Image (tube, grey):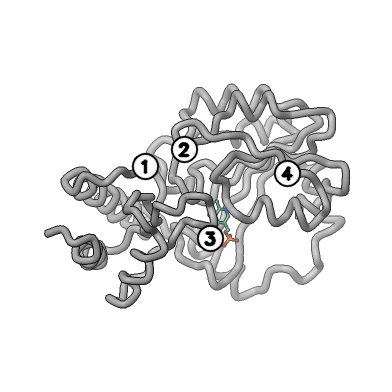
Amino acid sequence: MVGHALLAPGAEVVVSQYCFAVYPIVTALFGAKLVVVPAKNHAHDLDAMLAAITPNTRIVFVANPNNPTGTTASREELARFVNAVPADVLLALDEAYIEFLDEPLDLLPEIRNGSKPNLLLMRTFSKIYGMAGLRIGYGIGHPDFIAALEKIRQPFNINSVAQAGALAALDDTKHVGKTRKINSRGLKLYARTFRKLGLEFIPSSANFILVRIGDGQRVFGELQKLGVIVRPMGGYQLPEWIRISIGTPKENKRCLEALKSVLGQK
Ligand SMILES: Cc1ncc(COP(=O)(O)O)c(C=O)c1O
């Protein structure tokens, strides 16, 4: 929707290296120019992204935490960035994984007091709520910008079953708490095991973790034969890495055992 509202040939979109794959696709869809800013330690280099903004820039996409790296900007860094993005550039802040953070930066006050009309917070029920198949999410932004999105929103874009599910999910704090706990333990287990195995990994605050295992495509294929599906990262220019989704304790154990056997480690 932000692509429909803001992009056309001649417009520029600033993203980070290793950004979520959909941003380049949306940019190409509208014939706009993608400006990719090199990552710093696999994370967004927000200062460099700021410096990449030109008079033609219409949108900056930042996923925090990011997919596929799981990296997260510090609260201070992000607050500085939000304040520094020029008023005529939309900061599309993708908070798909925000519920997994212990102390996320709360930008709702900035939206509520109207001081950041160029900020759009984008959230989803696909991640911590586990409702990806229902295709429902939401954006929080200044009423003027939301009104612009309403002009191009398809009238029947969200169905009533998804809406009922989403409203119930918002009240299900028990599920969120339980999932956060299971996820945080899972992240620690993977980090600990990777250290033991001498595997490089990127510390993650999302519900997946990137680990460097050599030939990502081969390991993906071998794991699949053992009934474990991970994501090879060749499409993200990380051919030596795979991304593993954090599961239940039982699933994590099974995944790590399969990985050890594929890598020939005990
Ligand atoms: C950073 C990020 N944003 C958005 C999405 C898409 O979520 P949805 O299912 O709500 O379209 C994903 C899903 O992979 C994601 O990783």
The answer to whether residue 98 is left or right of residue 256 is right
State the SS at label 4.
strand
> Quick one: label 4 or label 1, which is nearer the N terminus?
4
Asked whether the beta carbons under mark 4 and mark 3 sit within 8 Å of each other, the answer is no
Asked whether the beta carbons under mark 4 and mark 1 sit within 8 Å of each other, the answer is no
> Quick one: label 2 or label 3, which is nearer the N terminus?
2
**Residue highlighted by disc 2:** 42
**Residue highlighted by disc 4:** 34
Badge 4, how many Cα within 10 Å: few under 14, some, many 20+? some
State the SS at label 3.
loop
Q: Amino acid at mark 2?
A: His
Name the one closer to the observer, 254 or 38.
38
- Residue at 84%, 28% (x, y): give it: 55
Distance in Å between CA atoms under marks 1 and 2 = 8 Å
- Residue at 65%, 39% (x, y): give it: 36
Pair 2/3: label in front: 2
**Residue highlighted by disc 3:** 125
Asked whether the beta carbons under mark 1 and mark 2 sit within 8 Å of each other, the answer is yes
> Quick one: label 2 or label 4, which is nearer the N terminus?
4
Measured as percent of width and height from the top left, residue 172 is found at 42, 60
